[in-house]
Image: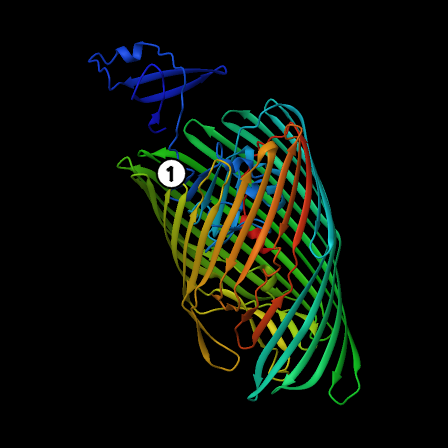
């Protein structure tokens, strides 16, 4: 700790350094003092005398935000952030975090992997299970080192307090919500802790009814004639019923070693999309055809996840071993009734039935060693992922398809960290990844892709006065999702198809990041060089059928991307906890558009945040969050209109925090969805209807503490790619 100020009736104008020792629940305080009134040459006198203090006021200078060689660490324990609710509510209020709803996103970096006590989260719902008052700190790593897969853009590491209490524990959360349609969910958790044994189980179920609307215009040129497909408006209804279960066993052998196993199963026995898709087609401004499509799309899916781990320290060696398995299976039926009407002709009905079945398997293992070396610490290890994905399509309009992707990734990594000159923290790492991919159609081998890459990373950080500075360099990769590595075509309607691209190349990004923090202030600047970014392009399905639009993924030319962000999170009047933030994103990308011309997409995009949390008497807590976004460009997207959104929340606890009630309303202004144009060989303009989201949740719990599971997981990014 740093220097503290102590007020006492016996010593005036005294500045003291103190230390506190906790023994069997009692506090003993030893005070070393230097008085301005009387200075003795016998310095041992102050160590040998006990001083009786009538009053002690301690002021700590420990910062809430502290940058390091990886990113930054935010101290939660002892701060006002302990009281915000769940860990998801907490993450939304941390600097650089863009969202925590459908997965944690970091401004300027994208999706982040989340770890709790070293264990990777597979399901974002788990963030709702961890109350914020059980969290010690959160580390946000914007440039992950070599110990993470090269495809990892960012990492959020949550460290919880040591679980207290033994015996049975229980937690149940009942939630009702409305997203332009009613929904309900329930999650029950039960656990048993005794000695080193920790056993827990979870059962969850939900029913959702969501309705959305969208407006689209696809513009393209054919033989110098301007053609438009105008969708006004597409109505989508989504209904789903799903459940999940999880069983986890953890045994802590001693303070240094633990083993465990975890299994979870998710099942969606009922999912159904209903889509009404009206389209008007114009040629040089004149209507020539109308189409009205009604699409029924029932789906079935299930997923299994399994993990086994060992984490232990043997002498000076820290050893972590993980084995993972993931099994996914999904089936989709698509029935389309389309009424086509040419101007001046009678309408006719076209019916199309398609079917898609995909199944994926992933097996992964990771072994990590860590040991002190030359005054620092060295970490090294290996990782292996084996992925198999099969897909079959039945499509009477285009053609049937059957494809398979086999991919194996072998990695070696090492990372060394050390404090130099007692102030400068340095970290350097290197990761080697060897990737072998084979692509098959109808059982015949069609193509192989082999990659051998080195990914370096360097991080430096040091305090300058009370300001913490850091600089990071790293290189990462984004491999295409397996569902995009196919030649199969999905039928939408007579003029819109969707397909994959087996020739997709991975995206390589080099990142340079500078950051600084001072108490509750944080700022970061990032420059990235992006090569072969993967985005959706709109092209003609074929030369023979130029009126049909094919949406498929493709690689973009290289370009630079920039981001600048600053956040302030003070505490005012002891009860008001505002967060002000500003993020600016820029790029120097240019692209060809529908009329054949080249445009520059370098208009910066800015977002401003003002989040507020107010603690009221008797356990009430009120939140009001505002966000404003400007127009601008991001990748191939241009946002046309600025918007302002307002979110409200209310929290109250009862019966000594055993019962909690939360209410929230999101996007009360209903303007979160901005109109966007995606520029390509065919320009796509789209605008979604938006509706406020309302939620009421009740949580009952007793003897609940976060689990002791320390499995770190392997093959994290591969799990995302096989979905």
Q: Position of residue 616 (x, y in %)?
A: 57, 36
Where 185 falls versus 549 (above or below)? Answer: above
Residue 192 vs residue 158: left or right?
A: right
Where 108 falls versus 122 (above or below)? Answer: below
Whether residue 117 is visible: no
Residue 560: quarter of image: bottom left
Q: Residues within 10 Å of mark 1 (few under 14, many from 20)?
A: some
Q: Position of residue 255 (x, y in %)?
A: 51, 24
Where 5 falls versus 279 (above or below)? Answer: above
Where 544 falls versus 360 (above or below)? Answer: below
- Please give the name of the residue rendered at 21% of the width and 13% of the height, measured from the top-left corner: 40
In this orientation, which residue lies closer to the viewer: 406 or 482?
482
Q: Position of residue 387 (x, y in %)?
A: 58, 53
Disc 1 target residue: 378
Residue 85: quarter of image: top right
Whether residue 327 is visible: yes
In this orientation, which residue lies closer to the viewer: 574 or 541?
574
Q: Quadrant of the N terminus?
A: top left
The number of numbered badges drawn on the structure is 1
Point out the residue furthest to the left here. Answer: 41
Q: Quadrant of the C terminus?
A: bottom right
- Please give the name of the residue rendered at 57% of the width and 81% of the height, measured from the top-left corner: 220
In this orientation, which residue lies closer to the viewer: 4 or 407?
4
| Label 1 SS | strand
Q: Position of residue 423 (x, y in %)?
A: 29, 37
């Amino acid at each position: 700790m740093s220097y503290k100020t102590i007020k006492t009736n016996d010593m005036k104008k005294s500045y003291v350094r103190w230390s506190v020792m906790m023994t069997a629940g009692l506090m003993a305080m030893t005070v070393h003092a230097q008085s301005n009134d009387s200075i003795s040459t016998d310095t041992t006198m102050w160590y040998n005398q006990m001083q009786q203090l009538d009053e002690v006021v301690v002021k700590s200078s420990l910062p809430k935000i502290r940058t390091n060689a990886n990113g930054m660490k935010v101290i939660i324990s002892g701060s006002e952030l302990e009281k915000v609710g769940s860990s998801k509510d907490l993450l939304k209020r941390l600097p650089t975090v863009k969202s925590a709803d459908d997965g944690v996103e970091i401004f300027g970096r994208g999706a982040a992997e989340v770890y709790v006590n070293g264990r990777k989260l597979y399901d974002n719902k788990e963030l709702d299970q961890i109350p914020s008052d059980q969290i010690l700190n959160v580390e946000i790593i914007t440039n992950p080192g070599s110990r993470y897969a090269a495809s990892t853009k960012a990492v959020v590491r949550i460290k919880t307090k040591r679980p207290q209490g033994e015996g049975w524990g229980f937690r149940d959360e009942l939630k009702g919500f409305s997203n332009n349609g009613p929904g309900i969910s329930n999650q029950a958790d039960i656990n048993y802790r005794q000695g080193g044994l920790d056993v827990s189980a979870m059962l969850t179920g939900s029913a959702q009814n969501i309705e959305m609307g969208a407006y689209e215009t696809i513009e393209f040129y054919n033989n110098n004639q301007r053609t438009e497909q105008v969708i006004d408006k597409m109505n989508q209804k989504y209904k789903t019923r799903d459940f999940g279960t999880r069983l986890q066993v953890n045994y802590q052998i001693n303070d240094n070693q633990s083993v465990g196993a975890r299994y979870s199963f998710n099942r969606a026995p009922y999912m159904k999309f209903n889509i009404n898709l009206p389209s008007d087609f114009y040629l040089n401004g004149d209507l020539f055809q109308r189409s009205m499509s009604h699409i029924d799309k029932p789906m079935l899916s299930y997923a299994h996840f399994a993990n086994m781990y060992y984490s232990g320290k043997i002498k000076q060696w820290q050893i972590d071993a993980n084995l993972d398995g993931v099994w996914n299976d999904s089936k989709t039926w698509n029935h389309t009734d389309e009424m086509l009407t040419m101007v001046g002709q009678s309408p006719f009905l076209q019916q199309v039935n398609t079917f898609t079945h995909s199944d994926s398997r992933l097996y992964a293992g990771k072994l990590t060693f860590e040991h002190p070396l030359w005054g620092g610490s060295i970490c090294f290890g290996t990782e292996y992922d084996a992925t198999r994905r099969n897909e079959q399509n039945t499509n009477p309009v285009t053609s049937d398809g059957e494809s398979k992707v086999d991919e194996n990734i072998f990695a070696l990594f090492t990372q060394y960290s050390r404090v130099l000159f007692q102030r400068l923290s340095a970290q350097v790492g290197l990761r080697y990844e060897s990737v072998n991919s084979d692509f098959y159609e109808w059982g015949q081998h069609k193509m192989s892709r082999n990659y051998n890459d080195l990914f370096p990373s360097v991080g430096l950080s040091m305090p300058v006065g009370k300001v913490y500075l850091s600089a990071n360099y790293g290189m990462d990769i984004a491999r295409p999702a397996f569902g995009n590595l196919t030649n199969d075509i999905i039928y939408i309607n007579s003029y819109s198809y969707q397909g994959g691209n087996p020739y997709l190349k991975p995206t390589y990004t080099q990142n340079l990041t500078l950051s600084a923090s001072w108490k509750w202030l944080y700022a970061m600047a990032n420059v990235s060089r992006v090569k072969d970014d993967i985005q959706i392009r709109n092209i003609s399905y074929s030369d023979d059928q130029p009126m049909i639009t094919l949406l498929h993924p493709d690689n973009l030319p290289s370009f630079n991307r920039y981001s600048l962000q600053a956040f302030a999170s003070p505490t005012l009047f002891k009860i008001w906890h505002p967060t002000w933030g500003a993020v600016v994103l820029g790029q120097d990308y240019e692209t060809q558009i529908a009329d054949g011309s080249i445009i520059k997409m370098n208009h910066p995009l800015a977002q401003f945040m003002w989040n507020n949390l107010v603690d009221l008497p008797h356990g009430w807590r009120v939140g009001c969050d505002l966000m404003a976004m400007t127009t601008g460009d991001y990748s191939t997207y241009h946002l046309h209109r600025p918007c302002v959104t307002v979110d409200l929340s209310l929290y109250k606890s009862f019966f000594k925090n055993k019962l909690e009630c939360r209410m929230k309303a999101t996007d009360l202004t209903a303007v979160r969805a901005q109109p966007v144009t995606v520029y390509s060989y065919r320009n796509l303009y789209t605008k979604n209807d938006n509706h406020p989201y309302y939620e009421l949740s009740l949580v009952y719990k007793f003897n609940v503490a976060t689990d002791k599971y320390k499995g770190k997981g392997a093959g994290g990014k591969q799990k995302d790619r096989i979905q």
